[in-house]
Image (cartoon, rainbow, N blue to C red):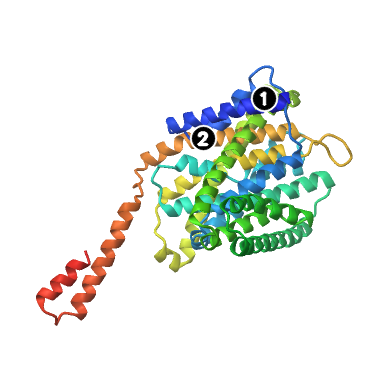
Amino acid sequence: MENIAVIILLLFGIVFLGLLSNKYKFPLPIALVLGGVCISIIPGLPVIALSPEVVFIIFLPPLLYAAAWNTSWHEFKANIRPISLAAIGLVIFTTVLVACAAHWLIAGLSWPAAFLIGAIVSPPDAVAATSVTKGLGLQPRMITILEGESLVNDASGLVAYKYALTAITAGNFILWKASLNFLMVAAAGIAIGLAVGYIMYIIHKKFVCDSVIEVTLTFLAPFASYLLAEQFHFSGVLAVVATGLYLSFRSGEIFSHQSRIMAYSVWEVVIFILNGLIFVLIGLQLRSVMQGINDYPASALVLYGVAISVVVIIVRFVWVVPAALLPRYLSKRIREKEAFDPRNMVIFGWAGMRGVVSMAAALAIPLTLPDGTAFPNRNLIIYLSFCVILTTLVLLGLTLPWIIRKMKMERYSAAAQEYEVRTQVASSIIMHIEENLSLLQDELLHILKASTK
């Protein structure tokens, strides 16, 4: 009971941080990670740790489902190439290079543990990206790519995380078998997610007419997808994403306006609490984590944290240049269809903030191996993950608005775009009238042209 009281009291502090964030236009994820640091230095607080399995079940399904639900399928499909390159290619690239850096830098760190670190810190966070870029006037396509990347790369990063855990706990890992198994696990997970989504669609459409029940079902859907897929040892993460995208695409058919408004409001509160709770938990555990790695000199720990964070940041910039330029060089259709601004590459590279999903994955590392021995380097992995989250959120998140202003990016305005579209439509109509209706009387032509403005 005392521990629950401490958590509730700290959540009040998180709410206060949210108030300050709104008042001073300060990105909430940055406030939360700094709040976690402050919690860790408060003397006398107990160490509260949830079971690693519980962390995954409580946090990941709703967080991934909310991200999928807020993703427009039409925009996601229209930008599937850059999203896939970032969400799959960049995640693998980051995982491998971070693993190489960690294995080379930290003496005694095994390859599986190094790959586990890489998998945890490889996916940027959707909430962090949208919170930091909110109000900066970025083009909708850039926002779509960042959100789509954060949705899919959570799935690919967590799949890599599962395989790294398996390599540590089972003690063996064969790449070609793991690759084949990955394809089967991913495909089956997506199939289960779509099946659950279709069943939920039928339930919503045929049987439910109460807003409270509809909103309740939106909470049950991600857990149903995740647990069902995991029961058969398939990818619960991909199942949740598939369910979320399917129901989001069909939401206009199954939800009333009242249900949509209620669901949006309730989910906003839940995601806020989950984001706050995960950083409360890391704050309560951070002191014991640091005690668990006191065999390392303080200077070495600072070096490890800074070095891994720098690798994570640089890898993203290294990837973005060929990923953006090669498709344009190889495809004339892309050059003609997609406008190109090199400043967008800088923004994309700078928007690689890590967040709550990486933190949840770190906290979900098992405490022990199957034989009962302590999980090797668990505290070090959690520490390095937190360093990357702290560095990317604070360094990149706080400087991104300044970078955008320095590059003098034109602010996107929905009203201006609407005016431009209306003007183009009116000009096309007037041109059609002049070319095809020129034999009409001048007065009638003038009336027709005026009615298009």
Badge 1 element: helix
**Residue 394, placed above or below residue 271:** above
> Taking the image as drawn, is residue 43 in sight?
yes
> What residue do we see at 74% from left, 41% from top?
54
Residue 135: give x, y in percent of width and height.
40, 42
CA–CA distance in space, label 2 to label 1: 22 Å
Badge 2 amino acid:
Leu
The relative height of residue 150 versus residue 4 in the rendered view (above or below) is below
Residue found at the far right of this picture: 371
Quadrant placement of the C terminus? bottom left
* Neighbour tally class for label 2: few under 14, some 14-19, many 20 plus, Cα within 10 Å: many
Amino acid type at mark 1: Val
* Pointer 2 or 1: first along the chain: 1
Task: Specify few, some or many for label 1: CA neighbours under 10 Å numbering under 14, 14-19, or 20 or more.
Answer: some
Residue position marked by numbered label 2 in the rendering: 28
Where residue 71 appears, as percent x and y from the top left, is: 53, 54
The quadrant where residue 374 appears: top right
Tell me the tag on residue 6: 1
172 or 374, nearer to the observer: 374
